[in-house]
Amino acid sequence: LVQTAGSVIIWLSPEFQILEWNREAEELYGCSRADALGKNYFEEFLSVADREVVLREKDAVFAGRETQEFENRVDRSDGSPRFVSWKVTPLYDAAGEPEGIIATGHDVTGREAAEREQRARDARTQHSERLESLGVLAGGIAHDFNNLLMAMLGHAELALMELPAGSPVTQDLQEISTAARRAAELTKQMLAFAGKGNFVTKQVDLSAVVSEITDLVDISAPENVRVAYDLAADLPAIDADVTQLQQLIRNTLTNAFEAVGDETGTVTIRTSTEQFQYSGNYIGGTLPSGAVVILQVQDSGCGMDEATKQKIFDPFYSTKFAGRGLGLAAVLGIARAHSAGVVVDSEPGKGTSINFLFPVSKKVAAPREVRVDAGGSWPGGGTVLVIDDEEAVRSLTARILEKHGLNVLTAADGRNAVDVFRDCSSDIDVVILDLTMPGLGGEATLRELRSVRQDVNVIIASGFGEEDVAERFAGEGVAGLLQKPYTPDVLMETVRDVLSREPAGA
């Protein structure tokens, strides 16, 4: 009966001595019946991790005098893992004393693998949704923060322009301006995490991008860390923003240097290309398929367990320091904005490899458009309509423009702006339009303005990146972009550029 049951059947004494071992047990464990009989199952066939569970089940079997069920992992003699669902039944002699145990098992490896893959998919989905929510939050905070910084930076620079030479408060105002600029860099990281950074993409060679910053990387590396470069030649082009790509590399390297710690170690930067199909664990987004260009940052540091790997791209997460900022969170945002996949390979004590998979560009390289100066000069006059729901930004922008001899009209929202424009459309030379406003937003306001006068020059003011704005206003023919927070010099340069152009049809 034992030999023909079709299930894995093992008969054990109360002390775990093997009394019977059927053909299915031979197949499962890779051990013949002759070799198994008489051996101690507990010591010979159970992993240390499973022994506590089996002892508990044995006690439960004899205490309750009934069948118990549980699952465990079985490692065959060839090293391959199997998963088995067991039913354990107690046997008693005529006197009612424990005589042994019959364990009946069914191989559920296929089911276990499917369940593990489903759990992994669910975890990836939850992680991606959590990062998406954090990205929306970061983008919203960055927008409001940019408006505050705009007021700080603008007023500080206006005050500096008014001060007489040698004023004792000059240095204080310069410090305020410097702090505001540094804060603006933080908002850029927040927008990068949200996938809405200031991106200006073009076709680039990834190896060339890395080569441009090797001197900076070598200087920033700790003395105990050697940086090695393995950069492939003749890589296919990728569509990327060079500044953001270099930010991604620097942030990832900072993480790698910290992983090495105080020990002597190596960090390797590697580029390559291949047809990539990956079905394992990855972080966020969707991995590109087909031809990809790979950037790998590999360190010889302490490595990470699975739980840590799932957290490294969370904002402010660090295993070594408290409150370390948006480093790898911004990295993930930049990667996602470039449609790049991120694969992390790491084990405790074996270092970490972070791999970025960029899809190969499908664009046909076009000759660069050269803008020719028409020879006209800005006469120094004109009327500008400033539309912004933030009063501090609106009044500051108006002051700067008026200081340079321009007439200024203002509107606190889109609907008010359309009314003002209808009354004065023939006199308005340029409109500065905030992209994000309650009620009638920037895109809807632009359509309303164009319905009144099609040829109106509109400059979009936004904390979001140039590429994001260009995508949203594709085909609308906007005249320029002001990246918040902008300085008085940048504001005037942008307005002068628009006012100096030849009128349409001239």
Image: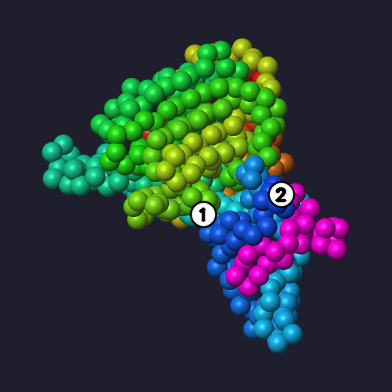
Q: Residue at x 52, y 23 (%)?
A: 271
Position of residue 71 in the picture relative to residue 1 (left or right): left
Protein image colouring? rainbow
Q: In the image, which residues are magenta?
A: 1-27
Position of residue 241 in the picture relative to residue 214 (left or right): right
Residue 373 at x, y percent in the picture? 51, 15
Instruction: Examine the image and state in which quarter residue 253 appears.
Output: top left
Residue 439 counted in the magenta span? no
Residue 418 at x, y percent in the picture? 64, 49
Say which element carries label 1.
helix
Q: Which is more toward the observer, 275 or 54?
A: 54
Q: Which is more toward the observer, 333 or 69?
A: 69
Q: Residues within 10 Å of mark 2 (few under 14, many from 20)?
A: some
Image: 61 above or below 468? below
Q: Residue at x 20, y 47 (%)?
A: 172
Q: Which is more toward the observer, 364 or 128?
A: 128
Q: Residues within 10 Å of mark 1 (few under 14, many from 20)?
A: few
Q: Residue at x 61, y 12 (%)?
A: 367
Task: Please report whichever mark, 2 or 1, sits nearer to the chain's N-terminal start.
Answer: 2
Instruction: Examine the image and state in which quarter residue 269 appears.
Output: top left
Disc 1 marks which residue?
307
Image: 263 above or below 130? above
Residue 32 is marked as 2
Image: 425 above or below 220? below
Q: Which is more toward the observer, 210 or 294?
A: 294
Image: 444 above or below 126? above
Residue 10 counted in the magenta span? yes
Q: Quadrant of the C terminus?
A: top right
Q: Is residue 2 visible?
A: yes
